[in-house]
Amino acid sequence: MTDFPKRIALLGSTGSIGQQTLDVVRAFPEHFQVVALAARQNVELLTSQAREFHVPVTACFAQPPEVAQAARAALPSVLLGEEGLLEVATLPEADILVAATSGLVGLNPTLAAIRAGKTIALANKETLVMGGHLVMDEARHAGVSILPIDSEHSALWQCLRGESSADVRRLIITASGGPFRHSTPEEMRTVTVEQALAHPTWQMGSKITIDSSTLMNKALEVIEARWLFDIPYEKIEIVVQPESVIHSMVEYRDGSIKMQASLPTMHLPILYALSYPARLDTGSTGLLRELHWPEVARLHFEALDVARFPCVRLALEAAKRGDTYPSVLVGVDEEAVALFLAGKIGLLDIAALIETVLEQHQPVANPDVPAILEACAWARQRTRELYEQSYGRKVE
Ligand SMILES: NC(=O)c1ccc[n+]([C@@H]2O[C@H](COP(=O)([O-])OP(=O)(O)OC[C@H]3O[C@@H](n4cnc5c(N)ncnc54)[C@H](OP(=O)(O)O)[C@@H]3O)[C@@H](O)[C@H]2O)c1
């Protein structure tokens, strides 16, 4: 028996995952109640969400700082800065934290929520990539569940349900292949920001969409899976499934393979994490389009061409080295993607910057949160310096 309504605190409510989480709440008002919302700077949307869902607690990180004034004017009791995010994450009235901010700001609030005994529905990848060892340790210690929102991890989780981990031969994570699945390196060298943002199957925030075009996103998902399911990298594989209908698979030692399928939508993995262990009937809600197999007609599977997508190799090497390398990976990727989105570098420069910054890093073993954040900040700074040296221009 699952206790409903579940009370939700939502970090990153104005983003792609945040807004889709609120779609799920709209579809199941008797099952879910939003008790706190947090965003960075989109005060207008945060305010309208707070009004629509009658949310008593709101937080605005206020970046840039001048946003704080507008936030206070619109929402007089709004909490500001990182303190605000921490309050939302640990609110006594909440049962579950949906961690859906982009970037590294999710790490501290997620750890605080775990210590406060909250169930975590985790979308934010950086949290596990940088701090998987801390997050999973703390969660085990606190007896708290980390429930994935990423569609691939939700698929793996659903395929693993009721099975013994000793029987797992390998996890197979599917990838759409992104917009440059068939592009040559020469073509990728000159792609525009608009082309890289035009993902063939998924509508997402801009950072993850660029990561999907370089396939960095897929490598980050392998790292997430390693931590979520406590499985070695050697047992995790990637296969390209361009229609994004099979969201991932688990192969068992007897050779049987379980897959999870749906049309591409984030509403389903969000709903599954929120309703777990129950399954709610989406039939009359209008939330999901039904999958009619004859319409899908054909499913394709291809091997991933790692040579054309060097971010995959670089990210997995950093993950296997461990220490602060994954934090550096997150920092340099974040900064390099921002440079690409600002039209300052080409798509292939992202991997080149990642390779150089990782090579120059002096690692710290078994890092705590300050060491993780310091390594990440160093990587961002080093990326900007390398850009300025190569292009002779300052990063504004
Ligand atoms: N989108 C997807 O389909 C998808 C799928 C799987 C996993 N994920 C992961 O989920 C996370 C969110 O992705 P997204 O696509 O939803 O990103 P997004 O559309 O860019 O939204 C990011 C959200 O985080 C908020 N935010 C950013 N920095 C913040 C800060 N310092 N303090 C408070 N809030 C902050 C933003 O607020 P403002 O709007 O006010 O700036 C916004 O609400 C990422 O880690 C991504 O990798 C996304």
Image (cartoon, rainbow, N blue to C red):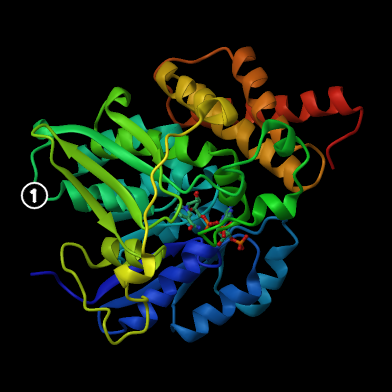
Quarter of the picture containing the C terminus is: top right
Image coords of residue 183 (percent x, y):
64, 40
Q: Nearer the viewer, residue 349 or 148?
A: 349
Residue on which the image places disc 1: 162
Q: Is residue 198 left or right of residue 342?
A: left
Image quadrant of residue 15? bottom right
Image coords of residue 235 (percent x, y):
27, 27
Q: Is residue 262 left or right of residue 348?
A: left
Image coords of residue 276 (percent x, y):
20, 63
Would you say residue 76 is visible in this rendering? Answer: no
Q: Nearer the viewer, residue 83 or 331?
A: 331
Would you say residue 202 is visible in this rendering? Answer: yes
- The residue lying furthest to the right in this view is 392
Residue at x 56% of width, y 43% of height: 181
Q: Nearer the viewer, residue 327 or 240?
A: 240
Image coords of residue 392 (percent x, y):
92, 27
Q: Regarding ligand 1, which quadrant of the image does it lie in?
A: bottom right
How packed mark 1 is, by other alpha carbons closer than 10 Å (few <14, some 14-19, many 20 or more), is few
Residue at x 58% of width, y 57% of height: 205
Q: Is residue 374 left or right of residue 298?
A: right
Quarter of the picture containing the N terminus is: bottom left
